[in-house]
Image: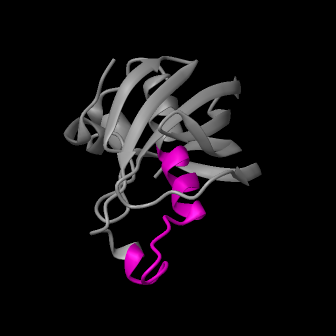
């Protein structure tokens, strides 16, 4: 399954400048997702992080993982209509074991690989990894819950 940014916006409530997933290239319901974020120098975060030495913030990488995990969670909950999806939101409960392996810079493409560790009801435990050019840049374990708005 592939999703472009228009289809992603039907699932996630995030919008510019906080929508951090540009494309989904692979999704296996209840198992895993592969999604991408193109990191551009025109993003507002680079005005202050860091002038003359732009580095994409680690918290933004984690948020991108969380958003990709949210897409995976929503699309793994069975056949939900757009109206049902619109009435729900994913809240992240914890981020554990976060590690940052290498800096991410403008011009890089982040590849998010998210897999399900465990799922019970509306609670999801996910393993998130972010790669640039096939090299692990960041990883974390994420816990989330789908709730009514």
Res 105 quadrant in image: bottom left
What stretch of residues is rendered in magenta? 46-67
Location of residue 87 in the rendering, given as x and y in whole percent from the top left corner: 38, 44
Left or right of 31? Residue 111 is: left
Left or right of 85? Residue 63 is: right
Q: Residue at x 33, y 43 (%)?
A: 86
Res 100 quadrant in image: bottom right
Is residue 86 placed above or below 40 in the rendered structure? above
Location of residue 103 in the rendering, given as x and y in whole percent from the top left corner: 57, 58
Residues 89 and 99: in front is: 99
Left or right of 81? Residue 132 is: right
Location of residue 113 in the rendering, given as x and y in whole percent from the top left corner: 54, 32
Residues 113 and 131: in front is: 131
Q: How is the image coloured?
A: one colour
Location of residue 5 in the rendering, given as x and y in whole percent from the top left corner: 24, 41
Is residue 57 placed above or below 130 in the rendered structure? below
Direction left: furthest residue = 6
**Quarter that holds the N terminus:** top left
Q: Which residue is drawn at 52% across and 31% down?
A: 73
């Amino acid at each position: 399954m592939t999703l472009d940014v228009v289809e992603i916006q039907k699932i996630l409530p995030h919008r510019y400048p906080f929508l951090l997933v540009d494309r989904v290239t692979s999704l296996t319901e209840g198992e895993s997702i592969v999604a991408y974020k193109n990191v551009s120098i025109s993003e507002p975060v680079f005005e202050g992080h860091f002038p003359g030495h732009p580095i994409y913030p680690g918290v933004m990488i984690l948020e991108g993982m969380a958003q990709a995990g949210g897409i995976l969670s929503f699309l793994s909950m069975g056949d939900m209509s757009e109206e049902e999806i619109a009435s729900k939101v994913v809240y992240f409960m914890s981020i554990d074991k976060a590690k940052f392996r290498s800096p991410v810079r403008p011009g890089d493409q982040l590849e998010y690989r998210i897999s399900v560790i465990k799922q019970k009801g509306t609670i999801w435990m996910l393993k998130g990894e972010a790669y640039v050019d096939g090299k692990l840049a960041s990883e974390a374990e994420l816990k989330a819950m789908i709730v009514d708005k």
